[in-house]
Amino acid sequence: MTLAADNLALTRGGRCVVEGLTAALGPGRITAITGPNGAGKSSLLLGLAGLLAPSSGAVTIEGRALAAMAARERAKAIGYLPQTPDIAWDVAVENLVALGRLPWRDRGTEAVEAALAALDLAHLRHRPASRLSGGERARALLARVLAGSPRWILADEPLAALDLAHQLALVGHLRGCAAAGQGVVLVLHDLALARNHADHVLVLKDGRLLAAGPPAEALDPEVIRQGWGVRARWLGEPGAMALSGVLPGEE
Amino acid sequence: MNRASGVFAVLLAVLVPLSLLAGRVWIDPFAPALPAGAGLILAELRAPRAVLAVVIGAGLGAAGAAMQGYLRNPLADPGLFGIAPMAALGAVASFWLVPILPPHLAAWSLPALALAGAGGGMALLALIAGRTASDAAGGAGGGIALFTLAGLMLASLAGALTALAITLAPNPFALSEIVMWLNGALTDRSWSEVAIAAPLTGAGIGVLALAARSLDALTLGEEAARSLGVDPARLLLLLVAGVGLTVGAGVAVAGIIGFVGLVVPHLVRPLTDRLPSSLILPSALAGACLVLAADSIVRILPLVTELRLGIALSLIGAPFFGWLLLRMRRGRL
């Protein structure tokens, strides 16, 4: 069930955005991909989702190269939630969620109902997307991914547009997915969210892996200094840590 | 078959017989004796014209629904994207060829060259936009935006070449023929035009139906659609082929009839769940209703010469477009 990158290199628009990256991600836990702006986080997530073909190296799922899989087979295994998921037509929540069944070519009524229930959307099923609040919308889009029953859930900044309460609620849902055995991979630029909620963290800088491991190690102040050029220290207690940082020379 | 399909199928079933009865010579089905020549008028004039209106309207409606789904934009019209102007350019070119062709070929040169123009437009669009679609898969992004620009480029090029053909028209008679023809009409069409348009349009709607579920996935954006297993290159080919067949066939036998593809999906959308796949069949039926009704009305208007159908629909369509823009500004679309 491992999703692995093996000496992965990715190119976008003629520019190398990820280089020589090797990492193995396990199911049943939340992996956070973090790093400074432009480090290649979103590109790596696209690569892991099989949506950006490697220019060298490979992404494998259970030892099989994603590039060699049929698009539908890959789509059944990996659910991907883009960073700014816009909804072109004003569809009702239940129809939006049912789009997750497209790779299966079935109605998947049970999976859709389960996804609606898991994200507490059953009472909003007939509401058009334009009349959802930001938090409801984020839940509906995640439910769309869950409805496809993917083994892996890959989401690009799913928490960025949400307030604190909705962030915690959505993390709770993702935690539930991990507990059920699904692999969850999130791009997070908020280091405190990564530190407090991830089981495993990959830190990227300039397309290369700077650190990987449990959050306390991978987001150690020394890594933050190297990655972001910020002198930082963690405050608070495990599970509710906050980051205090200053630019060098400002002390 | 959803609710919207049912509504427009019933409407069409009412409109077809009404359209057969209406015209310069009214046929009263309850009158004790039919007017002289009624059988001939029905079989040779009104029936092929009604069938052609249904076929062309269905093609334009389905193409509009698919195009709006593909571009994720309710203001898209299949006529804007190069295929109809290229078909028109092919047709205009035939006005140059007619005098030099043997008579038995001349009759077919217009639809044949219009279809060739549509085919050339499709090939160019697929070539330019197909390259950008594969770039998008490689991460350059903007596959659909570049499709739009490629289509607009093609449309303006075909428009310029058509204008050039008009200014260089071999004689005033050809000039007036070209200008008349560019404003589409169904006047004096026969079963032979039906035989050209019906199979091509049917095939085109079938191809668009194959793209329906992929268009649904695009509701979530290009990357999410790819993550759901949609192949952007295949979708582009289906769309270009489907729109090319329906619009090309329509232009080949009737000239340019605008705005149907833009207007019809808006009439249909509120009756559906708003996903593109739910729109294609009902938009075909509603497009058939709209063109049939408009063609029957221009036929019975008491004017010296018949109002051209293409002009009539643009007269309806342009204000409708403005109304859509105002509604969009108020965020109700």
Image (tube, rainbow, N blue to C red):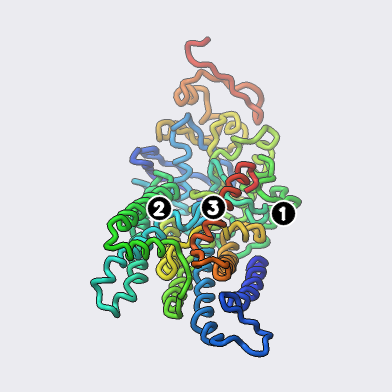
- Name the residue rendered at 67%, 55% in the picture: A94
Residue for badge 2: B151
Query: Between marks 1 and 3, how big is the CA–CA gap?
Result: 34 Å
Look at the image and tell me whether residue A75 can be seen: no
Residue for badge 3: B318
Question: Could you tell me which secondary element the residue under label 2 belongs to?
Answer: helix
Chain designation of label 2: B
Residue for badge 1: A126
Q: Is residue A125 left or right of residue B169?
A: right
- Name the residue rendered at 68%, 85% in the picture: B30
- For the residue carrying disc 3, how many other residues have a C-alpha within 10 Å: few (<14), some (14-19), or many (20+)? some
The total of numbered circles placed on residues is 3
Q: Is residue A217 left or right of residue A5?
A: right
Out of A210 and A54, give the one closest to the viewer: A54
- For the residue carrying disc 1, how many other residues have a C-alpha within 10 Å: few (<14), some (14-19), or many (20+)? few
Q: Position of residue A208 (x, y in %)?
A: 40, 34
